[in-house]
Amino acid sequence: MKLLKDLALVLVFWGFAIGPFGANIWKLINLDFEAPHKAEAIRTIGILIPPAGWVVGWMSDESLGE
């Protein structure tokens, strides 16, 4: 039973650690890449710089002007 709890804890941790990067990639792929390029630039920075990715991954689309 302890192994199952430890596995669940590890999966939750990695979900919160990796989740925003997946969200950034998904949202960047679905952008239109037409002017203005603010959202594209911020999403790309979020993918390239890990600490920024944790913040940008949870940002809403409206706050970036998407």
Image (tube, rainbow, N blue to C red):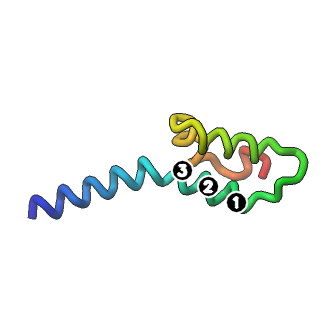
- Residue 56 image point, x, y percent: 60, 42
The residue positioned 13% from the left and 60% from the top of the image is 3
- Residue 49 image point, x, y percent: 57, 36
The residue positioned 74% from the left and 41% from the top of the image is 41
Task: Decide: is 49 above or below 33.
Answer: above
Q: Which residue is more in the foreground, 18 or 9? A: 18
| Image disc number at residue 54 | none
- Residue 46 image point, x, y percent: 61, 41
What's under tag 3, amino acid-wise? Phe
Q: Secondary structure at mark 3?
A: helix
Whichever of labels 3 and 1 marks the residue nearer the N terminus, that label is 3
What's under tag 1, amino acid-wise? Ile
Q: Which residue is mark 3?
A: 21
Q: Is 47 placed left or right of 64 in the picture?
A: left
Between the residue at mark 3 and the residue at mark 1, the CA separation in whole angstroms equals 12 Å
Between the residue at mark 1 and the residue at mark 2, the CA separation in whole angstroms equals 6 Å
Q: Is 31 placed left or right of 4 in the picture?
A: right
Q: Which residue is mark 1?
A: 29
Q: Residue furthest right?
A: 35
Quarter assignment of residue 22: bottom right
The reply to whether callout 3 and callout 2 are in contact (CB within 8 Å) is yes
What's under tag 2, amino acid-wise? Ile
The reply to whether callout 1 and callout 2 are in contact (CB within 8 Å) is yes
Q: Secondary structure at mark 2?
A: helix
The residue positioned 78% from the left and 52% from the top of the image is 66
Give the crowd class for mark 2: few <14, some 14-19, many >=20 residues within 10 Å: some
Q: Which residue is mark 2?
A: 25
- Residue 36 image point, x, y percent: 88, 45
Task: Decide: is 22 above or below 37.
Answer: below
Q: Quadrant of the N terminus?
A: bottom left
